[in-house]
Amino acid sequence: MKKEFAVIGLGRFGGSICEELAELGMPVLAIDHKEERVSKFASIASHAVCADTTEEKVLKELGIRNFDHVIVAIGDDIQASILTTLILKELGVNKITVKAQDDYHEKVLRKIGADFIVHPERDMGRRIAHNMVSNNVLDYLELSDEHSIAEVVASHKLSGHSIIDLDIRAKYGINIVAIKRGNDILVSPQASEMIHQGDILIIIGADTDINRFEKKAL
């Protein structure tokens, strides 16, 4: 069975999630307190509803607890975001992802039990900064405050050496979890695997270690 999603808040972030879920063929309920936003997504989402999600009665009437995953993407109204998340938890929603405005907002969300917290502006800023600083960095995904996954292009410095020869784990404290080579992807590559210039290395580790690797090895 397909998972059922609900997206609360149809601004840029929530709207893009809603569109992508719909594109993937997922049933999605789009909710916002602004009628014009709801109208925009009426033809995109499975259902679109104008509602105040800070009212427990409203969320109950929408049957929100029956959804597999609810995304709270409320924009600038931190109070509404927190209250909505709290009600969702109390109603027993299985998974809740919430957009955080800042670190204080995130702390509160963690205390009330949000399952996943995202900082789209901050995360995108970090990703863009890494891409601008190094031509070899293709993508950068934050896993926590201190750890990330990055996709980097192997330079001539790494070419012709095996993973064990380079001793990347010991020197930099990071792990190569996969190598993309053309249309192929090697998951959990062997230590004897040779790296070629242009290979895309998917690495995981502490941000400080990834930064050292970017500066010295690429």
Image (cartoon, helix red, strand yellow):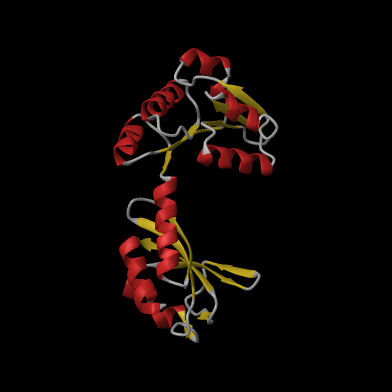
Visible residue check, residue 117: yes
Left or right, 11 with respect to 213, comes to right
Tell me the quarter of the picture where residue 126 sits.
bottom left
Percent x, y of residue 92: 47, 23
Q: Nearer the viewer, residue 156 or 188?
A: 156
**Residue found 35% across the figure and 78% down from its top:** 216
Q: Number of marks in the image?
A: 0
Residue depicted at 40% across the width and 29% down the height: 77
| Residue located farthest toward the bottom when viewing the structure as drawn | 160
Please give left or right for residue 168 compared with residue 49 in the image. Answer: left
181 to the left or right of 46: left
Q: Where is residue 125 shown, x and y percent of the image?
A: 41, 54
* Residue with the most extreme front position: 36
Q: Residue at x 43, y 40 (%)?
A: 116
Q: Choose top left, top right, bottom left or bottom right for residue 15.
A: top right
Residue 218 vertical position relative to residue 14 in the rendered view, above or below: below
Residue drawn at (64%, 32%) of the image: 40
Image location of residue 208, percent across then percent down: 31, 64
Counting from the top left corner in percent of width and height, residue 184 is at 64, 70
Q: Quadrant of the N terminus?
A: top right
- Residue 173 seen anywhere in this rendered image of the structure: no
As drawn, 93 above or below 124: above
Q: Specify the farthest residue to the top.
A: 57
Please tell me which residue lies in front, 109 or 103: 103
Which corner quadrant holds the C terminus?
bottom left
Q: Nearer the viewer, residue 87 or 125?
A: 125
